[in-house]
Structures are given as C-alpha cells and as structure tokens.
Image (cartoon, coloured by chain):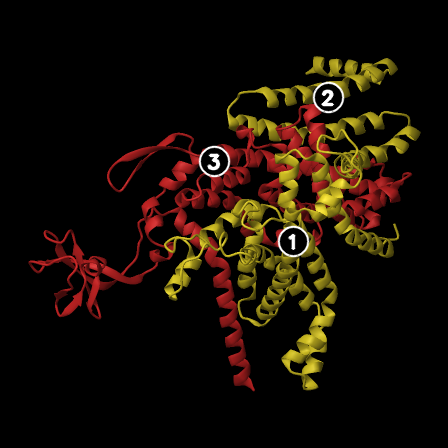
Chain colours: A yellow, B red
Amino acid sequence: MQQERVQSNFALDFIGSTLGRILVSVFVPLATFLALYYGFIFLRDSGAPRGIIAITAIIWGVGGVAALYFVTNWFVERLPGEWTNRLQPFVFVGPAVVILAWYLAIPTFRTLYLSFFDANSNNFVGLDNYTAVFTQRIMIEAWTNNLIWMFVGTAFTVIFGLFIAILADRSSFERVAKSFIFMPMAISMVGAGVIWKFIYDVNPNIGMLNAVVTGAGGKAQGWLTLVQPWNNLFLIIVMVWLQTGYAMVLISSAIKSIPEELLEAARVDGANEIEIFFRIIIPNIAGTLMTVITTIVIFTLKIFDIVMVMTGGQFGTEVIGVRFYREMFVSGNTGYGAAIAIVLLIAVIPVMIYNLRAFSKREAF
Amino acid sequence: MKITRRRATYIVNAVLLFIVVVWTVPIVGLLVSSFRQRNDIQSSGWWTVLPHQGWMSTGEELPIPPDQTRDQPITIEGVTATFDQWREGVAVNNDTRLVWVGNLRSGHLERYTLQWSANTNFTFDNYQQVLGGKSFEIRNVDGSTNTVQGDNLVDSFLNSLTVAIPSTVIPILIAAFAAYGFAWMRFPGRRLLFIAVVALLVVPLQIALIPILRDYVNLELNGTFLGIWLAHTGFGLPLATYLLYNYISNLPKDILESAFIDGASHFTIFTRLILPLSIPALASFAIFQFLWVWNDYLVALIFIGITNRDAQVLTQRIADMVGSRGQDWHLLTSAGFVSMIVPLLVFFALQRYFVRGLMAGSVKG
C-alpha cells in the first residue's frame, strides 16, 4: 500500500516533467492507434468463430471511436491554454466534417467528374452518358415507371394516410389501429418483397390474391410478370403498404394540433364534416402534407429494394434505382452509372434549396 | 342527433377495423406459413389453418357399379356423370360428394361430407433448416428422401448485428460531439460547415457509392465490417448531426454556464452533462438508424458484395434466397420472419421513440 503510493508519486512527478509530458503525449496516441490497427487486422484476417468476431468487432468499433475522441481531446487539453481553445472545437467537429467530406461532399464532385468519362473512366465522352440516360429505350421505360411510382405511389400513400388518420381520430381504438398500420415501417423492403411475392404467387393454394380471384370465379394470374403494365401497380402497392404508416403518423399529429375551438365554431355555424375537412383541416395541415409528399416523392425516386427483390426490373418494371445498380455494379459502366446518380441529385436540388432557406430563415445561427 | 353520432362512430370503427385487418393480414400470412410443413404450403393456403368448412372423407367405401366403360356416363345414386368427373368428385346432394378412387375396374367410391376442420399441423423444421448450416433430410410424399443444404441464417443474423450496432453507435457518438461543437463552441467556419450539413441532408447516397467503392478497393476496406460501419456513419451523419444539434442547442444555457464557472472543461461538460440530458434525442435517432441499417440492402450489397458470403447480412441472404429458392415458400417465409423479428421487437418495445425519430428524420437522403 505504502510502496504503491510512493511509486505513483514518482510516476506523477515523471509525467509532470516537460520531457515526460512530451513522451506521454506522443506515446499514448501512438499506442491507441496501434491497438486499433491490430484490432482491425485481427478482424479482417481472423478465422475465429463468428460470435467471437462479432463481439470483438462491436467492442473494437464502438470503443475505438470513443477512445480516439478521448485521446485526441486529452492531447489537446495538454497543450498551452490558447492552443487548447483554438483546437478543441476541431476535436469535437473535425471527425464529423472529415467523414461528411469523404463520404458525401467530395464524392458528389468525383461522381460528376466520372459522369463525363466512358465505362473505364479513361476517355472523355462529354455529355454522351447523359444523352444515353434520357434516350435509351430501357431508360425511357425506367423513367416512365419512376413517374408512375411517383404519382400513383405518393397519391395513394398520402390519401390512405390522411383517410386513416382522420378515421383513427374519431374511432374508439386509435392507438392500437395506428400501431398496426405503422408496423410495416419497421420491416425491410426486402422482407416486404418476400411477403408480397407470397401474396401474388401464381398458385391459388399459395398466393392469397389468386385465391380470392379464383374463389370469385376468375382465373389465376401472374400478377408480377404477365399482367403488364399493371404489374407496376402491384409493386407500388407494396410501397403504399410500407409507407402509409409514416404519412398517417405525421398527418395525425398535425390534425391533433388544430385548435378544437376552431372545429367547434365551424360546427356551431352549421358546417358539415365534409366542409370542415376541406375548409379547415386541409388548409391547417398543408405544411405537413407538403413535407410528407416531398419525403415520399424522394423515396419513390430512389426506389430499389422492392423492385430488385420482386421482379429484378424484368417484365417492364425497370426503375432508375435498379438501372443504376446494374449499370454500375453488374456491367461496370462507371460513366453511365455516375450520370444516373447525378440526375438523381439534380432532381432533389429543389428540396435542398428549400431546406437551406428554411434553415437560414429560422436560425439566428 | 345522439343516435346518428353513435352510428357514425360505429361505421368509423368498422371501416378502420377492416383497414387494420387488411394491413395486418400479409404479416400474419407469412408468420403462419413459416410454421407450416412444406407439403401443406404447396397444397393448401395458409388461411386453411382457420376453422373452415371443407370436404372430408367419412371413411365409408362404396362398391363401384360393375361393367362400366370409360366413355359412357355412369349413374350412381341417381346422379349421372362421366368417369373423369367421378374421379374429380361429384356432389350427389347438398352435403355429400362421391369420389371414385382407383381405376375403372378395381377402384371404389368414397363418401365425402362437408365438415368443419382446420389444418393445424405446425412444425419448427423450416426454422431449423434456414437457421442451421448443416444439411437437412426431407421426406417426400412418396417416401423417398432428399438432402438439402441449410441456409445458415444464424451467421447472417450475427453479421447483421455486427453491422447494425456499431453503425448506430458510431454516427451517434460522432454526431453528438459535432452537435455540441456547433451549438456551444465558437470557431471559424462554423456557420459554413453547418450549412453544408443541412445541404447534405437530402443528397441521395447513390452519388457516393462509386467513388467510395474505389477508395475501399484501394484501402482494402471492401467487404470489411469497418468499411460498412464507416459507410453507414457517413450516410447517417447529416441527419444525426442536424437532429442532435436541434436538441442540444435548445438545452438551457445556464446549466452550461454554471458548469463553466465551476471550472469544468468542454469534454467534461459534454460527457457528464450534455450526453445524459440528451438521452431522449439520442434514443430516437438510435432506433431510427438501427432499423435503417438493419433493413438496408443497397449499401450492404455494394460494400459487402455478392461474393463475400461469410460477411453477408440478412437482407442480402434473403434477397438471394428469393432468387435461388423462389418456390420454397416454407423456407422463404421462415427466413423472412427471421429478418423481421428484431425490427418488430424494437418497434413494439420502443414505438414512441421510433415514431419521434421517424418524424424528425423526414427527409433522409
């Protein structure tokens, strides 16, 4: 006990000395980086059982990031006071800025650059990729389908969401109902693809839709393959099923924020429910409706998983998201894929500008 | 007046109940089917597990009328039909059907009556087969057996966890530091950097895939857990920073000021004061990001890849199974449910936080 204290005093003295400070300041970050590096090598090359790798990976990843912050901050706080003040903000903000730059900001320009080159990124081709993106037969099919997704999908989602929100508001089991409508939001689009492929199966003993159709005296159909172009609608139904919960929740909370007196006053004045709906509810939730519509339009623009899993873009169901994946990662058509990505980006720029405007209006930053 | 209002509520409840049932049936169908035997799924719909009226054999065998020919109509119990029709089964009165079993000369007739029944023959075999990696023996109806390789979803399940947990914690940690920096520290470039964060909110992640994949190939990060964590961190960071900034910048100023007067450093204030106070916001975003990563297909497809089977996550394996085992619904349904169990549990346990996170994260790119 006594001895320990003497030792620790000695250690503290040493750390307190200038030389010790410098040595420790260099050694601690170095040791941290080395430990993390060897952790990475172990994870990459080890043949240990899956469970052990999983746990090590989680501890290494989460702990590593925390350790990096701790050590860099520790280092900066050891600098002279003025430097601490100058550098500490960058310890806090720096990692986020570096990652955002590496993963989103710089790639935007790199992709833009690549979009002017050919498949191997060797020869400059000008706007050829963009011309192809808008003129190729398969791309025209994809754009047409995306427009269908955008209009039909968004319309159905928002109308269902609004309808259910209003029904739920007046029902006696609002919370339970909303919970069940919302549940599909938790499921992956791949999972939803499996669920609905099952429902659309050609065999009426398996597919529920065909069971209903044959039960009503009709003929079983290949809903996803042969019923063109309506098969796009059967894919859109999957998205409506997934996203209506989202629309409903947002709209429902907007409806609840309409002052009760306003509705009561209208009722006293003799307005019927339909008039109240169009004259009072709709104008009051217009802002929320715009948010919901924007979000779902962006969502449909990038739709990928559902189509990829259910039809793979065959049978006339091609969409931009699937085209992008196939051109880029199956055919290795870098320039072409990059051009598609840039067109997607251009499509969301109005939303980006709107967000920036809203931000600068609101913020006394 | 009162009566019409009560009737209105009654109609609202009925309509809403109908919608809720329609919305829930797809998931119920998947769940029920995943416990049914392979042959049952092929021969009868999952809804037959509910009590239903169907034709059941009474076990009573009748002798066939002698000396019949195939092409002449045969009259039994006053009903005339061809041999082929008899083999399909012919109703002799409202609740009895006769079916010709066997061939023309040596068969017999079996009596069927309408009876209530339910196909409640459930099994865990499907789950054993999709979860385990060992080969599995299947007994066919005719008594022969064939061996099928299991799908080893336990590994993918662990991979999904290994990907999702750090991909949730790391961006939150980085974003919380950055949000604190933006909210409570003063440094050059602060406003510009935050405007960049807002602008990046809606950038479609497709824009980043090509350049980042190139970097990963150069850095040998392709197919590693670190690579996919960083990718999800990068794509989730704008939203995380934005949301946490909104929350942290609205915390009462005097708490921080009194802590400063007591001589606490930024790091201490952040870890001891701000993080605990921000738990509601952290939880909301954590759930949103966790489900987003767990359900993600595109990012995994590109950064883990199709060839690297050891590291594949659930969504990839299930999408694969849809392609390779398209008609093995006993496996697809159980595999689908395996991938949904975690999101559904998270959803039902933490619904409030999930809804809040989702409402805040309306325009994720």
Above or below, B310 against A234 in this view is above
Residue B271: x and y in percent read: 74, 37
Of residues A189 and A3, which is closer to you in this image? Answer: A189
Q: How far apart are the two marked residues, 1 and 3, measured between alpha carbons?
A: 33 Å
The disc label shown at residue A294, or none: none
Q: Which residue is mark 2?
A: A33
Q: Nearer the viewer, mark 1 or mark 3?
A: 1
Q: Which residue is mark 3?
A: B153
The image shows residue B152, relative to residue B280, as above or below, that is above
Q: Is residue B357 visible?
A: no
Q: How dense is the environment of label 2, judged by Cα within 10 Å: few (below 14), some, or many (20 and up)?
A: some
How far across and down, in percent of the image, does residue B256 sit?
Answer: 82, 44
- At label 1, the amino acid type is Asn
For mark 3, does the 10 Å Cα neighbourhood hold few (<14), some (14 to 19), or many (20 or more) residues?
Answer: many
In primary-sequence order, the first of circles 2 and 1 is 2
Report the Cα–Cα distance between label 2 and label 1.
Answer: 47 Å
- Going by the numbered disc 3, the residue's amino acid type is Leu
Element under label 2? helix
Residue B76 at what x, y percent from top left?
12, 65
Q: Residue at x 10, y 53 (%)?
A: B105
Q: Where does the N terminus of chain B fall, quadrant-wise? A: bottom right
Q: Which mark is residue A146?
A: 1
Q: Is residue B103 left or right of residue A107?
A: left
Mark 2: which amino acid?
A: Phe
Q: Secondary structure at mark 3?
A: helix
